Image (tube, rainbow, N blue to C red):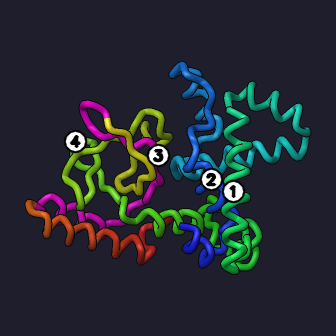
Amino acid sequence: MLLAAEEEKCTSEALIVCSMLSLRSPFASTRSADLEAARQRFAVYEGDAVTLLNVVRCHRARLGAKGPARASQWCRRVGLLERVLQRAAHVENQLRRQLLRTGVPPESVATSCDNNPALGGTTGTNALRRAIVAGFFANAAIQKAGGHYTTARRAAPMELHPNSVLYRAPPEVIVFHETLFTTEREHIMSATKVLSRPRLQGVRMDQTRAEDGDARARAHAHLLQLLLAEEWLQ
């Protein structure tokens, strides 16, 4: 993902997402109603990874404008764990130093879009989502008729967890970042939305007909080819 972010000129955003995905959720509430309210303050339709980026951006904007004390009060008021955000900043700095050692400079899509508006698109996250897909393309999953998701590599059904921002409006195609096994099934805890094109219907048919491992592998390869061709993004 970070290597793809260099090509997309969004390494700064990718560093934030990588650091946040490596830690526990930044939302403090344990009661479902409070947790939902806290998450909806920052939720974006592109998915959980971009929502985490939004959380960090909002916290840093408050920190810069109001100072540490007021930022701490704000975190408690909106249901965020400030220690998680502080730990994420530490992890981000470590990753940034590693990238600098390899000659990868930090770039932000916010400034790159000035010269290339296509990097940001209408939401300002197109370049980041392309980098996410490049990094997690092996975790691409398609929604089936029953509402669950499957990958071509595995026929076992997966469901979006209620803690995902995509739970109430599940997209047809996603790339997932984290799953949780329960006694009943596997839940997708974190995912990024892939806005499908009509051509992906052929992949759905391939998966429906795939009864053996080789057929599922071919269907998955077809899907990955379309994703990496960047013909899915709007």
> Is residue 172 highlighted in magenta?
no
Kindly identify which residue carries mark 1.
Answer: 92
Give the SS element for disc 4.
loop
Marks 2 and 1 close (CB-CB < 8 Å): yes
Q: Residue at x 68, y 48 (%)?
A: 88
Q: Residue at x 24, y 61 (%)?
A: 153
- Amino acid type indicated by mark 4: Gly
The residue range painted magenta reads: 182-210
Mark toward the start of the polypeptide (4 vs 2): 2
Marks 1 and 4 close (CB-CB < 8 Å): no
Q: Is residue 73 toward the left or the right of residue 40 in the image?
A: right
In this rendering, the label closer to the viewer, 1 or 4: 1
Label 2 to label 1, Cα distance in Å? 5 Å
Label 1 to label 3, Cα distance in Å? 19 Å
Kindly identify which residue carries mark 4.
Answer: 146
Based on the displayed image, in which of its 4 quarters is residue 63 positioned? Answer: top right
Label 4 to label 2, Cα distance in Å? 34 Å
Label 4 to label 3, Cα distance in Å? 20 Å
Kindly identify which residue carries mark 3.
Answer: 190
Mark toward the start of the polypeptide (1 vs 4): 1
